[in-house]
Amino acid sequence: MAKLTSSHISFQELEDIIELLGKVSGFNLVGYSKSSLKRRVQRVLDLERMDIVDLKNAIVNVEGFRTYLMNEITVNVTEMFRDPFYYAALRTDVFPYLETFPRLKFWSAGCSSGEEVYSLAIMLTEARLYNRSFIYGTDVNSHVLEVAKKAIYPLKNFKLYTENYNATGSFRSLSDYYTAMYDAAIIHADIRKNMLFSQHNLATDYVFNEFQFISCRNVLIYFDLELQNRIFHLFYESLSEFGFLCLGTKETLFNHEIMAKFKVINKKFNIYQKIK
Amino acid sequence: MEKANEVVLVGGSAGSYTLITDMMAALPETFSPAIIIVIHRNPRFTTKIEDTLSTRLQKEVVQAADKAAILKGGIYFAAPGYHLLVEPDKTFSLDISERIHFSRPSIDVLFETAADVFLDRCTAFLLSGANQDGTDGIRQLQRMGAKVIVQSPTEASISTMPKHAIEASERVDIYSNRQILSYFRNLK
Ligand SMILES: C[S@@+](CC[C@H](N)C(=O)[O-])C[C@H]1O[C@@H](n2cnc3c(N)ncnc32)[C@H](O)[C@@H]1O
């Protein structure tokens, strides 16, 4: 497959592609980490057996190609209950606090195909908070959002998801929340009920609601510090007083001035609370 | 602290752990390249190689953090569960995309991205392992003029990985463990 590639893209060519995409579409890749982006673009070239000239041509002239390209460039790898101890930390460090709010709004930013959103809904159900909750799952990638809305996943993934779920210390069984049909699993309607998936681009879009809880996990690693900074301000503006911000295990607020407006709730899992 | 002008890369899998710790123990007090290591480990067992080595060597050995600068004389390990990439401004970035050769972190990803940035100011070591990770990375390193050294398959605990690399590319140097250790002892 990849071995038949004819052309290797350079950083300069990558810059040209970013500029071109910015000019002809709303997709802004300026703040993305360059090396990972370059690998993703190279992957599309290899898949499509294109060279850089073909790629530019397709970006400008081929109907639907820009959306396809964005969907291929973004890294959507995800799982249910990824980092089980993070979910355990939500239960012990965050949920007791959330109980004091009469209505709860959650935002999972960069939710990919929805596994993180359903995991959160299950945790909220078990904490008896889900009935007063509403979760917004957003992503820039239109394809993964379609998958998220369907709530149907390959059954073979559920061995790992079950291990993850059990490691969170939950007292139930993950199979209480899905029905297996042939080689697929569909998430139950009572877990799917209070949520909405929609497109939102963290690099270019703005505040759209006020939340008590925002999680943005394994998304910020794809961005440079400047774009991270923009997004942290967006999150800050989107959080209610004493709202929570949860990042991935390798993502931190500590490199940013805005840290001063947050309190660390869990250092290992990068859970913060807005205090000013 | 200044950013590194030169890097030494190390890729190891099953059977490479002891040699890697010996390599780090052989290092002199000061040296100018940054040393960046990918060793495959199970993310579920959070073996703290960094902490163990820091204590044993009385040197700072860290997990490469996302967006951190690659500094002269730094010793960095790739975080389990994430690919480790080198950015053009000589910083690290992490990536959680698909496993490559069943591995994340992948040696190929580190080698390829470091080659694109540090060009011929790169020396790479590929050690014992049971898969084929590293071979593609070596090709890219060689394209960019970097020096590539493979652990002698006769000395590697598991020879699949070094053998695969040697078969796939000419121009790799094959070192015995003694030669590898002496390289690190004499690093300036
Ligand atoms: C690795 S996934 C993380 C999924 C999930 N949060 C997790 O931790 O498992 C990263 C997601 O970020 C999304 N993403 C990338 N750029 C984005 C942007 N500018 N705005 C919103 N989402 C973005 C990708 O489409 C992808 O689905």
Image (tube, rainbow, N blue to C red):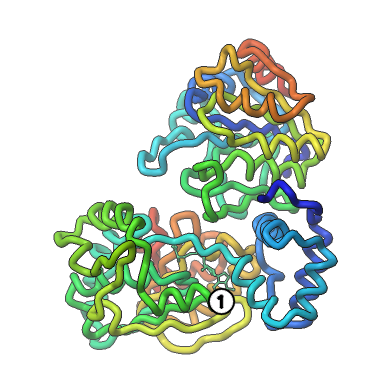
**Residue B138 position (above or below residue A10):** above
**Picture residue at 24% right of the left edge, 69% below the top:** A178
The residue carrying pointer 1 sits among few (fewer than 14), some (14 to 19) or many (20 or more) residues within 10 Å by Cα, namely many
Residue A48 placement (x, y as % from top left)? 71, 62
Regarding mark 1 in the picture, which secondary structure is present there?
loop
Q: Where B150 sits versus A33, above or below? A: above
User: Percent x, y for residue A161?
Assistant: 31, 57
For badge 1, the amino acid type reads Val
Q: Residue at x 61, y 54 (%)?
A: B67
Front in this rendered view, residue B38 or A40: A40
- Residue closest to the far front: A182
In-image side of B77 versus A31 (left or right): left
Which quadrant does the C terminus of chain B fall into? top right
Q: Nearer the viewer, residue A90 or A47?
A: A47
- Examine the rendering and report whether any part of residue A240 can be seen: no
Query: Does B34 sit left or right of A17 as displayed?
Result: left
How many numbered badges does the structure rendering display? 1
Does mark 1 have its CB less than 8 Å from ligand 1?
yes
Q: Is residue B188 left or right of residue B9?
A: right
Residue B53, image x, y percentages: 48, 28
Q: Quadrant of residue B114?
A: top right
Residue A141 visible: yes
Q: Which residue is mark 1?
A: A140
Q: Residue at x 25, y 80 (%)?
A: A189
Image quarter in which the N terminus of chain B is found = top right
- Residue B126 image-quadrant placement: top right
Q: Foreground: B146 or A101?
A: B146
